[in-house]
Image: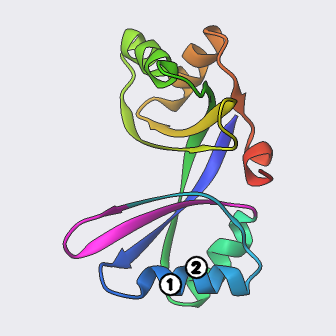
Amino acid sequence: MKVEQISIFLENKSGRLADVSTVLAQGGINIRALSLADTTDFGILRLIVNDNEKAKQILKENGFTVGKTEVIAVEVADKPGGLAHILNIMKDKGINVEYMYAFVQKSGGNAIIIFRFDEIEKAIEALEGSGIRILKGEEVYSL
């Protein structure tokens, strides 16, 4: 039920994102989802890719600092209130959302939201108990 996400720590300067994407492209790595958070000096690029181990290896070989985090990919109705429904389940269970990002495959269907929770096992239990579909890693990597 968990999805492996890689995080790349980047200097906040021109061209660093291009460098990461070029290295991944040359390695045949497909980016499935991404999020970028930045400060004045550095950024954290969070990626879900089709081949985590290969991506981590080639990024490290090219001088990037790479970490790994477990997140959850949740299928959410792509309509007003879809996200609110998920967040209210977490609120009712006292589970904190550390961060999230989303992507939509096609309008009118379901969106997929990537969540990092402070209590991942408790979040999985709460979501499944509420009938929410959590995607397996393999499903997300192959989208």
Could you tell me which secondary element the residue under label 1 belongs to?
A: helix
- Identify the residue shown where x is 69% and y is 81%: 25
Q: Is residue 62 left or right of residue 119?
A: right
**Residue 104 locus on image (x, y percent):** 62, 42
Name the magenta segment's main secondary structure.
Answer: strand
Q: Is residue 42 one of those drawn in magenta? A: yes
In this view, 69 is above or below 15: above
* Tags 1 and 2 touching, CB below 8 Å: yes
Could you tell me which secondary element the residue under label 2 belongs to?
A: helix
Q: Is residue 13 left or right of residue 7?
A: left
Mark 2 Cα-neighbour bin, 10 Å: few <14, some 14–19, many ≥20: some
| Residue nearest the observer in this picture, 42 or 121 | 42
- Identify the residue shown where x is 67% and y is 11%: 131
What span is colored magenta in the figure?
A: 37-50
**Residue 72 locus on image (x, y percent):** 59, 37
Give the image's coloring scheme.
Answer: rainbow
**Residue corresponding to mark 1:** 18
- Give the residue type at disc 1: Ala
The quadrant of the picture occupied by the N terminus is top right
CA distance for labels 1 and 2: 5 Å
Which image quadrant for residue 57? bottom right
Q: Is residue 35 visible?
A: yes
**Residue 138 locus on image (x, y percent):** 80, 47
| Residue nearest the observer in this picture, 67 or 139 | 139
- Identify the residue shown where x is 50% and y is 89%: 63
In this view, 124 is above or below 68: above
In this view, 56 is above or below 37: below
- Identify the residue shown where x is 46% and y is 13%: 89
**Residue corresponding to mark 2:** 21
